[in-house]
Amino acid sequence: MKSFEKLDAWKVCHALVLATWKATKPILDTERELAHRLRYVTLRAAGRLAFASAVGGSPMFMTAVIRADGYIAEAGYVLDLLRVMGTVPDPTWQELDGLRGRASFYVTKLLHDSYALPDDLRSPLDDLDMFDWDEPEDWQK
């Protein structure tokens, strides 16, 4: 088993790729560019995660995972567009959007888990809570 095959995020993205290819086959003649775009972005998301697993804990890992997240977001937009245009039936859209949502969850979880740095590598600024500061009492004067 390759290392990327162990990632939950990749597993869901791979399932999304397979479902997308199957679902877009009937619309290739009518909405060729959108079907190809949806295929491309789902494939790229899974591909970026495979690449990320190959580079390990380097900064390139985070970059690849962030790009995968962007591709998944773009897939959501294309899916919504195809649904609004009436090109993709609702049951198909629900299946693909459900997989896309799961992929987004697992990629976000991977990002969050990867961001947890050992204490000796953390910046003191990481511990600041930007939204819970007390305002000075005389700020309104």
Image (tube, grey):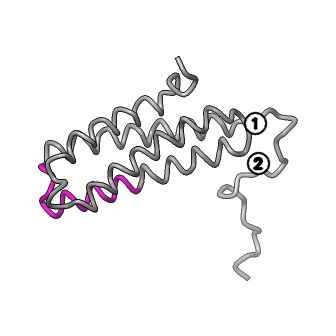
Residue 3, by quadrant, is top right
2 vs 1, front mark: 1
What secondary structure is the stretch in magenta mostly built from? helix
Judging depth in this view, the residue of 20 and 131 nearest the camera is: 20
Q: Quadrant of the C terminus?
A: bottom right
Contact? badges 2 and 1 (CB < 8 Å):
yes
Residue under the point 33% across and 49% down: 39
Would residue 102 appear left or right of 123 to someone viewing this image? left
* Residue found farthest to the front: 29
Instruction: Kindly identify which residue carries mark 2.
Output: 126
Name the spot of residue 12 as percent of width and height, x first.
Answer: 40, 32
Name the spot of residue 26 as percent of width and height, x first.
Answer: 14, 48
Name the spot of residue 75 as percent of width and height, x first.
Answer: 36, 53
* Residue found farthest to the right: 120
Marking on residue 117: 1
The amino acid beneath tag 1 is: Leu
Judging depth in this view, the residue of 24 and 16 nearest the camera is: 24
88 over 54 or under it: above or below:
below
How many numbered marks have been drawn onto this rendered protein structure?
2
Q: Where does the magenta region start and end?
A: 74-89
Crowdedness of circle 2 by 10 Å Cα count: few (<14), some, many (20+)? few
Q: Is residue 75 magenta?
A: yes
Name the spot of residue 19 as percent of width and height, x first.
Answer: 27, 37
Crowdedness of circle 1 by 10 Å Cα count: few (<14), some, many (20+)? few
The amino acid beneath tag 2 is: Asp
